[in-house]
Amino acid sequence: MSATHGSTIIPCLRYREAHAAIDWLCRAFGFAAQAVHEDDQGGVAHAQLTYGSGMVMLGSVREDGFGQHMLTPAETGGRETQVACVIVRDCHAHYTQAKSAGAQIVDDYAEKDYGGAGYSCRDPEGHLWWFGSYDPWAE
């Protein structure tokens, strides 16, 4: 099975302040808001943010059927069980942009032995992200 557009694997996150998170992720990381659907409490029922041919989906923290299985980094002491890895063309420029927007750098920008460069950081609600120029799909 293949997608007609983008990736067939899409990370999903929950944020306490989903509207602020969407704005920050677009400004700091270069995502574009493809769709944002409000819930009846003024939060985000569902949002889709794109970056290149990839996507993340997110929504407001809530105790619904799916949400009861998820925790925020604030509830786990900042520990994650998964991390979104995003391929970027100019990793150093991306690092500079994210850092100036207030991303908490976890692993500083570095050239990697296996090729490309990368860094990891946390967004304002503590979700861990990895960005790098290494493209495992490149031939």
Image (spheres, grey):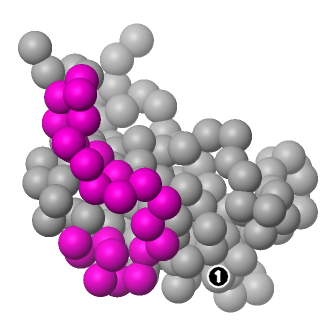
Q: Is residue 99 magenta?
A: yes
Evaluate whether residue 35 shows in this view. Answer: no
Q: Nearer the viewer, residue 4 or 105?
A: 105
Quick one: quadrant of the N terminus?
Answer: top left
Q: Is residue 120 magenta?
A: no
Q: Position of residue 71 (x, y in %)?
A: 81, 57
Q: Residue at x 34, y 17 (%)?
A: 2
| Relative side of 41 to 12, left or right | right
Q: Is residue 77 above or below residue 25?
A: above
Evaluate whether residue 69 shows in this view. Answer: yes
Q: Quadrant of residue 6?
A: top left
Q: Position of residue 50 (x, y in %)?
A: 33, 55
Q: Which residue was labeled with disc 1?
A: 17
Which residues are the magenta region?
96-119
Q: Is residue 101 above or below residue 14?
A: below
Q: Residue at x 21, y 63 (%)?
A: 94
Q: Position of residue 69 (x, y in %)?
A: 85, 46
Q: Amino acid at mark 1?
A: Glu
Q: Nearer the viewer, residue 61 or 28?
A: 28
Quick one: quadrant of the C terminus?
Answer: top left
Secondary structure at badge 1 equals loop
Q: Residue at x 20, y 42 (%)?
A: 111
| Relative side of 94 to 40, left or right | left
Numbered-mark total: 1
Q: Nearer the viewer, residue 99 or 43?
A: 99
Q: Position of residue 45 (x, y in %)?
A: 66, 68
**Mark 1 Cα-neighbour bin, 10 Å: few <14, some 14–19, many ≥20:** some
Q: Is residue 4 above or below residue 84?
A: above
